[in-house]
């Protein structure tokens, strides 16, 4: 009985050691999240040429398209909204609400292991923008190195430069610095201008989850006034939620990739040893 149990535990431990990391360290396909940010910002008043600045809220609504995804690739739909923080503000406002400053929708597909954008191929419509680099998360076991990061406003990948470690509510994170300097963009339909951004992204290195983010943006009209200024950061409540989720996911990963192999392999070997000793002792007794 002990020998059978030992064999089972040993096989289970070895399977968990070899197979589990490649299964659990992949972007899940049940993502359905809303990220909340707050800060100060505003758009230009064309009549006065001044920025109408005040409290703002932003939301990023990300949902995995399970039908379009597969074992290797995760497909996402993201809706982003920037709104004046006036009255009861939902995750996003209708287009005719004057509190809505901007709204956008994007589709993208990423490798479930590396988290990097993949070729749109058959995953997305032919007219979908082709991004590059990381977007909504870092890979599991993130490293202290630079990564390519997709900036949707600039429409290009820029370097996310590893800067330092920092604690967010007791969780150690890696901080990456992303700078865009006067990238040419269309500020509004038919209006050319430039876009600059200085962003810090705080990553849980174990799961690759984005825990906190700050962003300072400026947009200018070519030959004209500043079109938009923005200072945004994850809300305190959002940071707490992200930290709690990261710690829970870390415990699950540790259980599957560390403790199950340890218990299985060493427990199995111990059971096999004890079983073999008991079997040997029984045979000696029968001989005597």
Image (tube, rainbow, N blue to C red):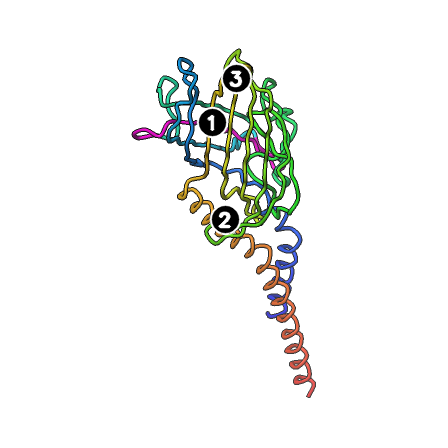
Residue 45 x/y as whole percent: 41, 17
**With respect to residue 246, does 181 lie above or below?**
above
The magenta stretch spans residue 80: yes
Residue 253 x/y as whole percent: 55, 52
SS at circle 1 = strand
* Residue behind mark 2: 246
Question: Which segment is the magenta one?
Answer: 69-89
What is the C-alpha distance between the residues marked 2 and 1? 32 Å
Nearer mark to the viewer, of 2 and 1: 1
N-terminal-most mark, 2 or 1 = 1
- For the C terminus, give its image quadrant: bottom right
Nearer mark to the viewer, of 3 and 2: 3
Identify the disc placed on residue 221: 3
Instruction: Name the residue at 46% across, 37% down.
Output: 233
Identify the disc placed on residue 192: none
- For the N terminus, give its image quadrant: bottom right
Identify the disc placed on residue 229: 1
Check whether the beta carbons of the residues at disc 3 and disc 1 lie within 8 A of each other.
no
Q: Between residue 6 and residue 36, name the one nearer to us.
A: 36
**With respect to residue 26, does 68 lie above or below?**
above
Instruction: Name the residue at 42% across, 14% down.
Output: 46
The magenta stretch spans residue 174: no
């Amino acid at each position: 009985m002990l020998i059978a149990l030992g064999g089972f535990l040993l096989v289970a431990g070895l399977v968990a050691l070899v197979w589990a990391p490649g299964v659990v360290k992949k972007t899940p396909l049940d993502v359905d999240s809303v990220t909340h940010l707050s800060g100060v910002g505003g758009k230009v008043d064309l009549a006065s040429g001044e920025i109408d600045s005040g409290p703002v809220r932003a939301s990023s609504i990300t949902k995995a398209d399970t039908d379009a995804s597969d074992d290797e690739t995760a497909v996402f739909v993201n809706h982003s909204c920037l709104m004046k923080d006036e009255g009861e503000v939902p995750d996003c406002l209708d287009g005719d609400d004057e509190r809505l400053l901007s709204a956008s929708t994007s589709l993208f597909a990423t490798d479930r292991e590396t988290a990097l954008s993949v070729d749109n191929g058959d995953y997305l419509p032919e007219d979908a923008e082709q991004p590059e680099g990381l977007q909504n998360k870092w890979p599991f076991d993130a490293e202290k190195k630079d990564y390519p990061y997709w900036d949707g406003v600039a429409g290009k990948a820029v370097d996310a430069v590893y800067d330092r470690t920092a604690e967010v509510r007791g969780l150690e994170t890696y901080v990456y610095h992303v700078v865009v300097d006067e990238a040419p963009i269309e500020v509004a339909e038919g209006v050319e201008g430039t876009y600059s951004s200085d962003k810090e992204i705080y990553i849980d290195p174990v799961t690759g989850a984005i825990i906190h983010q700050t962003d300072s943006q400026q947009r200018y009209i070519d030959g004209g006034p500043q079109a938009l200024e923005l200072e945004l950061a994850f809300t305190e409540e959002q940071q707490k939620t992200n930290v709690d989720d990261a710690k829970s996911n870390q415990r699950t990963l540790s259980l599957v990739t560390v403790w199950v192999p340890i218990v299985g392999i060493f427990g199995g070997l111990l059971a096999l040893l004890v079983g073999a000793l008991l079997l040997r002792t029984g045979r000696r007794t029968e001989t005597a």
